[in-house]
Amino acid sequence: MNSTPYHNIAEIYDQIRPEYPPELIADIAEYTGLSEDSVILEIGAGTGKATVHLLSLGCEVDAVEIEPAMAELMQRNLSSPKLHIYISSFESWESPHRNYDAICCAQGFHWLDPETKYKRC
């Protein structure tokens, strides 16, 4: 994932990026069967616009974010024992070797390396 477009603009991004409708997350949870026992891998979590909804379901979230300032803002906004933030590109991220109930990538899948993104998922 390339962080260049978002370098040094975490605060602005967080202010202007629209929120995700709670109904969307509810539909995803219903369709996938997510529950408070679910563990989710979120790729390109940014400042946590989708993460907040996943946490509100009671899910545990491993959030991978390449841009350190975005990850720092997410940590400030969403302090939770169920949130684990990894500052890394998805392509070079070392998984803690967990089984995930779902993999989420709200708006960044197109940034990932097309040669490896599906295989890594």
Image (cartoon, grey):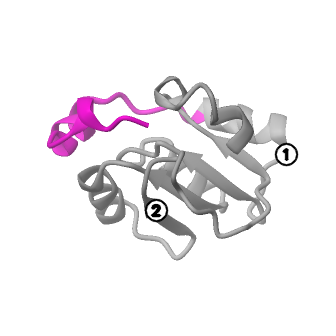
Helix or strand or loop: what does disc 1 sit on? Answer: loop
Is the C-beta separation of discs 1 and 2 under 8 Å? Answer: no
Judge whether 67 appears above or below 78 on screen: above
- Of badges 1 and 2, the one in the foreground is 2
Looking at this rendering, what residue extends furthest in the front direction?
A: 115
Q: Residue at x 72, y 67 (%)?
A: 97
Q: Which residue is mark 1?
A: 33
Whether residue 96 is situated above or below residue 101 in the rendered picture: below
Check disc 2 and report its element: helix, strand or loop: strand
Residue 80 visible, this angle: yes
- Quadrant occupied by the C terminus: top right
| Number of the label disc, if any, that sits on residue 20 | none
- Identify residue type, mark 1: Gly
For residue 86, the mark is 2
Q: Which residues are magenta?
A: 1-22
Judge left or right: residue 59 versus residue 19.
Answer: right
Which residue lies at the image location 49% right of the left edge and 28% below the top edge?
Answer: 107
Residue 60 percent location from the top left of the image? 64, 64
x 58%, y 56%: residue: 56
